[in-house]
Amino acid sequence: MLGPSFTGAADKKKKRPAPVVSPTIHQDRTVTFRIKAPAADKVSVSGEMLKGKIELTKGKDGIWSATTDPVPPGLYGYNFSVDGLKMIDPGNPELKPMRSPKTSVLHIPGGNPYDFQNVPHGTVHLHNYHSEPINRYREMLVYTPPGYETEEKEYPLLVLQHGHSDSYETWIAYGKAHWILDNLIAAGKAKPMIVLMLDGHPIPESYGGGRSPENTEELRKDLMQAALPMVESLYRVKPGRENRAIAGLSMGGLHSLTIGLNELDTFSTIGAFSAAPPDSAALKKALDNANQTNNQLKLLWIACGEDDFLLKENQTFTKTLTEAGIDHTFILTQGSHSWPVWRGYLADFVPLLFQ
Amino acid sequence: MLGPSFTGAADKKKKRPAPVVSPTIHQDRTVTFRIKAPAADKVSVSGEMLKGKIELTKGKDGIWSATTDPVPPGLYGYNFSVDGLKMIDPGNPELKPMRSPKTSVLHIPGGNPYDFQNVPHGTVHLHNYHSEPINRYREMLVYTPPGYETEEKEYPLLVLQHGHSDSYETWIAYGKAHWILDNLIAAGKAKPMIVLMLDGHPIPESYGGGRSPENTEELRKDLMQAALPMVESLYRVKPGRENRAIAGLSMGGLHSLTIGLNELDTFSTIGAFSAAPPDSAALKKALDNANQTNNQLKLLWIACGEDDFLLKENQTFTKTLTEAGIDHTFILTQGSHSWPVWRGYLADFVPLLFQ
């Protein structure tokens, strides 16, 4: 005998309403957003791809929808506002990993350095571990370049840190750091390298005050005493400080500057993307010994956008470096405190590494 | 001179409201849920840890909250209902990966097989790839057991598939398959093995009709012609059909039964957890050649809960197998069509593999 067709059986057993799929990207790159909210009075969508918000219109079955003008290729964060409540798009599986998830992802590929392109691809590895030095459960991501699994080579290491509202996953899921690296390596513009991404909130309670020296110190301990030794034991990492760089955005820039300039025996290159600059007191050793610091630093790369709310702090910080006689590069770019800028900084910074 | 303290500067520059942290697990295992929804009239929380829903109470700043009775250790999905709109907890970074993300995760560790325990841990690897045979962008996760990076051994392979509303990430982020494997391997109850997890919706439009034969066939092509060869080229996978198993839950059970029983030259063991059973027509070759099928099958393991809405279909399907003379194991358990049951099935099934 024939068994039942499941679909039919399921339809009888359990009525499953047709899913609300959102967003829909049309041929002309207009985008339709949808959300089912029968009881709502007002629904709008806002996002990096829009100037201002778009009001959605309520249709049958309580499904609200709106279609945008054509959207340029790019990767954009967006969210719905349902009667004033900011939320993700429940029709979209792609989310920006955040401490407070409120942002969905619209990715329209098209000639951007962070697109998935037809090139050899690296691998992203998730490690869950208990960090003995800080006695905490931790998570990390490790990117290995194309060919890692099949070629017996050693590779230099970049530590790449996220911002205050992000998680250890954000540089991959939203920054597309792995695709930026894949594309730069395929183009011969970057050395194949391993990238380590740690959770920047080792003190979870520090969220809201995550720039506290205590949180940075916990991260330093975890990186130096647990994460880095673990990565060096599990992966073919090329030894030597000349093969170690650390960089990060915003709070991750604070972490990179503070840890990097205090651990110059480990790191020779430091990148600060729209950084929250550290208090000079946290850098006393490096600032008071300019000659030794300059001898150990291959590159101290600081970038900030002209519309970034941290621009003034970055200018004050680089002034501090200059007055202390610390060699550094400061790059003023267009843009604000935002991911389009940081994806660009990564693409500009990575080719400078390990040359 | 001293640079500014960033925190102070930021506070002046950009007022950041204190984050709404949710959930908070208290010492007595009561749990407080919070959400900021100033305009809402009615907010409740529902979840696997609750009988029915709990109404939240509106406090100052429009922050709603409620505290549960003590919750037993476990891993639970839950969501908020805000004026009838079902949504994730925006204060909780832990989400269940789903096609339509509406579920947040509450994990209270305590002696469960899916807890992160103090044992050696494996690694979960993310691969983004373009699948030539189906000409689609695809994602996969690969679990390697503890010691993989440091020991030059070969390992057997389990293909593990998710359900209809899930994604390729759900067995890890919500099923905790990696921790179940870590714990079983540490206890000597399971052979160290590699686990491959694919997206079960190769035809994205199939969501809502994801059990279509077309979708299953696309998955079979991707697995057999792209994913499996890729994994066998990148990882130290022990050759031979006796070292290949395939299993899945619900729609993933449909996929495992259909692909497994049609690819017996590749797979020797098949697991179906609360499966959506395939139409017999899709298994004609295996059903019409019972002797050869039985000779090739080491184990056909089918489990379903007594409260599962698919129980009758599973009973009909096993009757079909019996009448066709196909050897199989059918296990009736407690429970419904739910993740607590599937985590248990994985913990029961994995020790039977590759013995």
Image: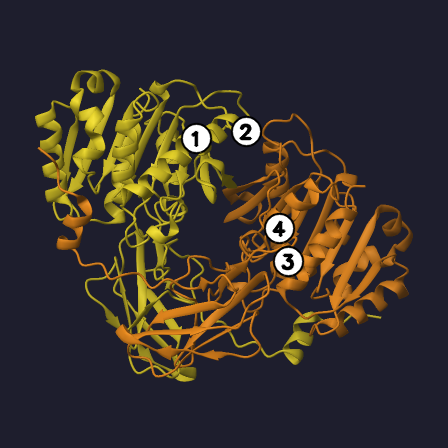
Chain colours: A yellow, B orange
How far separated are the C-alphas under marks 2 and 1? 26 Å
Q: Nearer the viewer's eye, disc 2 or disc 4?
A: 4
Mark sitting earlier along the chain (3/4): 4
Name the secondary structure under disc 2. loop
Q: How many marks?
A: 4
Disc 2 + disc 4, Cβ < 8 Å: no
Q: Quadrant of residue A38?
A: bottom left
Name the secondary structure under disc 4. helix
Residue designated by label 4: B177
How far separated are the C-alphas under marks 3 and 1? 47 Å
How far separated are the C-alphas under marks 2 and 4? 23 Å
Q: Position of residue B148 (x, y in %)?
A: 62, 32
Task: Say if labels 3 and 1 share a chain.
Answer: no
Q: Is residue B83 above or below residue B337?
A: below
Identify the residue at image location x=56%, y=69%: B49
Q: Quadrant of the C terminus of chain A?
A: top left
Classify residue A330 as left or right of residue B50. left
Q: Quadrant of residue B16?
A: bottom left
Q: Nearer the viewer's eye, disc 2 or disc 3?
A: 2
Q: Residue type at mark 4: give it.
A: Ala
Identify the residue at image location x=39%, y=69%: B34
Could you say which is closer to the camera, residue A203 or residue A69?
A: A203
Q: Residues within 10 Å of mark 1 (few under 14, many from 20)?
A: some
Mark sitting earlier along the chain (2/1): 2
Name the secondary structure under disc 1. helix
Residue designated by label 3: B216
Q: Chain of mark 1?
A: A
Task: Say if labels 3 and 4 share a chain.
Answer: yes
Residue designated by label 2: A149
Identify the residue at image location x=52%, y=26%: A233
Residue designated by label 1: A225
